[in-house]
Image (cartoon, rainbow, N blue to C red):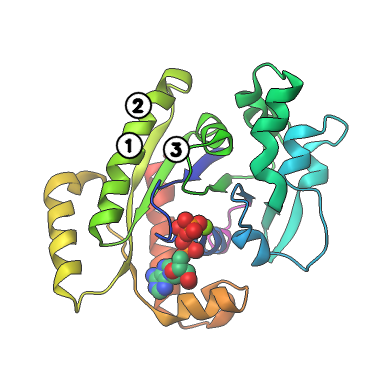
Amino acid sequence: MTKTICIANIKGGVGKTTIVHNLSHALSIKGKKILMIDLDMQGNLSDRSSNGQQRNSVYQLLTDNDINTEQCIHQSGIPNVDIIPSQINIGEIGRVLEQRGTSKRLYILKERLGEIGKKYDYIIMDTHPVLDYLFVSAMIASDYYIIPAVPSIDSVKGINLTRRFVIDIKKTNPNIKELGILINNIDNRTNTSKKIVASLEQNIGDTLFKTRIPHNTHINQAALNYVTTFQLKKNSICNTSFLELSDEIIKRMI
Ligand SMILES: Nc1ncnc2c1ncn2[C@@H]1O[C@H](COP(=O)(O)OP(=O)(O)OP(=O)(O)O)[C@@H](O)[C@H]1O
Ligand SMILES: [Mg+2]
């Protein structure tokens, strides 16, 4: 059965897009079929997975009944990984549907994804750090969520805020589960980083993924070149981390 995972942290810039892109590639190397969905109007994930063409996006998916889900799915440039891209106007979807008086508008994404059937092992959603229509729709459509965090006080606050928000979401989607907290951009040479990670281990150690994604320039270089770290360099240390993370994720979902 397809499992849907939302990558979420109300704090911005913690590596959500980076993780969706590289984790999807790692899972595909493990033989899985993946659909990525870009629910961020900045469209960073779409930029990294596009050949520059105008394509049906999340906008058409959620607002146009004449277009089916398949018509919004495109190749991402990674074997066995597809994408439903973003568009700058997706931030307006909530307002457009409200003006139309569309009932059950928070469930449209879930229903549309249901149309795909069992084609994918995992659907992985990239969200933006705003508690709006798109974010709520993503959490309602998800079986699991992962909270990425970087070793900073603000980011740790983001974990708590995101978890508090999930308490509300559970009233609508009681089955959603936390798959884990993922520490990203860790630099073991700095004391602040070490202290924050030690405190997280002490307080929420059981929910942390064992895999940590290191601070590494390959990640930035890959993003700048619109590719994953696997496409950038065969022997990057980051590839090992994303492959280990994919193993942990597969195990946690059994
Ligand atoms: N482990 C890492 N090592 C080095 N750079 C990283 C790492 N993780 C993320 N970055 C860089 O940090 C920046 C922010 O990452 P990213 O865009 O993935 O965050 P985000 O959470 O999706 O941001 P937003 O909330 O704006 O959507 C990017 O330039 C990315 O290349
Ligand atoms: Mg992002």
Question: What type is the residue that disc 3 sits on?
Answer: Tyr
Of helix, strand and loop, which one carries label 2? helix
> As displayed, is residue 47 above or below residue 159?
below
Return the mark for residue 167.
Answer: 2
- Residue assigned mark 1: 163
Q: Earlier in the sequence, mark 2 or mark 3?
A: 3
* 3D distance between C-alphas at marks 2 and 3: 14 Å
Answer few, some or many: residues within 10 Å of disc 2's Cα (few below 14, many 20 plus, some between 14 and 19): few
Question: What type is the residue that disc 2 sits on?
Answer: Ile
Splitting the image into 4 quarters, where does residue 185 fall? Answer: bottom left
Residue at mark 3: C-beta within 8 A of ligand 1: no
**Residue at 59% from the left image edge and 50% from the top image edge:** 40
> As displayed, is residue 131 above or below residue 7?
above
Q: Which residue occupies the foreground of this view, 253 or 201?
A: 201
Question: What type is the residue that disc 1 sits on?
Answer: Arg
Q: Quadrant of ligand 1?
A: bottom left
> As displayed, is residue 189 above or below residue 164?
below
Of helix, strand and loop, which one carries label 1? helix
> As displayed, is residue 244 above or below residue 239?
above
State whether residue 84 appears in this view: no
Return the mark for residue 237.
Answer: none
Residue contact between numbered discs 1 and 3, judged by CB atoms under 8 Å: no
**Residue at 83% from the left image edge and 29% from the top image edge:** 65
- 130 part of magenta stretch: no
- Residue assigned mark 3: 144
Q: Quadrant of the C terminus?
A: top left
Q: Earlier in the sequence, mark 1 or mark 3?
A: 3
Answer few, some or many: residues within 10 Å of disc 1's Cα (few below 14, many 20 plus, some between 14 and 19): some
Find the magenta span and give its range: 28-35
Residue contact between numbered discs 2 and 1, judged by CB atoms under 8 Å: yes
